[in-house]
């Protein structure tokens, strides 16, 4: 008696066509949410011409930024250093993710990510107008948002490569890790940034983004 053929495995997800993935990727980017208000911790370390090892808490409301340095070189500061700025989020996924209007995306293959697969593409900018550009894109196989962006950068006497990883926090898609290696003036340099403890309050007081007024200048009476 002939043995019956084993039934096909039906619970293993099938790889999607690479163009279908790009279509879903474009739709996911168009719909990605950007928080109006966010608070998070980040740590940055640099080794090279300038050595840095710091921990920060950052508060953002739109373009308004309050950046508090909590520790430096492994020492917790008794008085935190506070910097106020107005600037765009340089890591916002809607801002940095490559789009098909600006990049040619060539499918390279898939990589295992837990119980699903992510999709990897070579990214080639159609116009080299920027000193920094993405050269490889990994698309998350569930959300179809960028899981990782590998980039190349060049400015002055510095050239380097790096990668930024993203993940979900609440309903948002946020950076979790960035690493970079560079050559600066003929010398090697490395940088690592980690983000953690994301919070998305409904609002923050306006006073959080206003530098304190300096104390009145005191003068001694004439002798």
Image: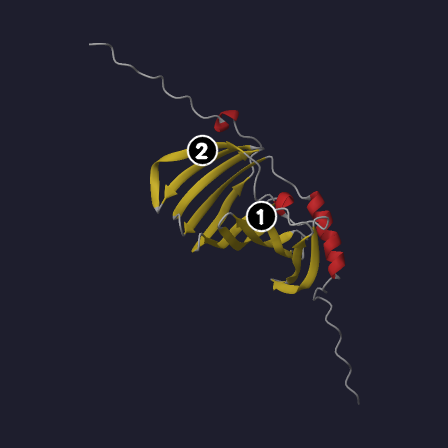
Q: Please rate how many residues cluster around mark 1, counting C-alpha atoms within 10 Å: few if below 14, some from 14 to 19, many from 20.
A: few
Label 2 crowding class (10 Å Cα cut-off): few <14, some 14-19, many 20+?
A: few
Instruction: Give the quarter of the figure containing the N terminus.
Output: bottom right
| SS for callout 2 | strand
Q: Is residue 186 visible?
A: yes
191 left or right of 24?
left
Mark-to-mark CA distance, 2 and 1: 27 Å
Q: Position of residue 193 (x, y in %)?
A: 48, 49
Q: Give yes or no for contact between labels 2 and 1 (Cβ–Cβ under 8 Å).
A: no
The structure residue drawn at horizontal position 71% and vertical position 44%, both measured from the top left corner, is 30
Residue at numbered disc 1 = 131
For disc 2, the marked residue is: 83
Q: Nearer the viewer, mark 2 or mark 1?
A: 1
**Quick one: which residue is furthest to the top in this view?**
222
Q: Residue at x 61, y 52 (%)?
A: 134
Q: Is residue 220 above or below residue 117?
A: above
From the top left corner, tell me how far across and down residue 163 is, in percent. 55, 54
Quadrant where the C terminus sits is: top left
Q: In the figure, is residue 117 to the left or right of 59?
A: right
């Amino acid at each position: 008696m002939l043995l019956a053929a084993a039934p096909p495995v039906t619970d293993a997800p099938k790889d999607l066509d690479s163009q279908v993935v790009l279509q879903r990727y474009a739709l996911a980017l168009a719909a990605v949410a950007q928080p109006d208000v966010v608070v998070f911790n980040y740590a940055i370390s640099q080794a090279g011409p300038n050595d840095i090892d710091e921990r920060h808490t950052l508060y953002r409301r739109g373009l308004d930024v309050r950046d508090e340095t909590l520790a430096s070189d492994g020492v917790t500061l008794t008085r935190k250093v506070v910097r106020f700025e107005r600037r765009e989020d340089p890591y916002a996924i809607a801002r940095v993710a490559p789009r098909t209007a600006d990049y040619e995306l060539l499918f390279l293959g898939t990589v295992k990510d837990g119980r699903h697969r992510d999709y990897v593409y070579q990214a080639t900018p159609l116009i080299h107008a920027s000193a920094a550009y993405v050269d490889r894109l990994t698309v998350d196989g569930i959300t179809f948002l960028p899981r990782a962006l590998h980039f190349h950068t060049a400015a002055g006497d510095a050239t380097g490569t790096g990668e930024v990883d993203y993940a979900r926090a609440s309903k948002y898609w946020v950076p979790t890790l960035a690493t970079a290696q560079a050559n600066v003036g003929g010398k090697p340099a490395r940088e690592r940034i980690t983000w953690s403890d994301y919070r998305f309050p409904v609002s923050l007081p306006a006073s959080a983004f206003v530098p304190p007024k300096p104390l009145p200048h005191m003068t001694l009476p004439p002798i």
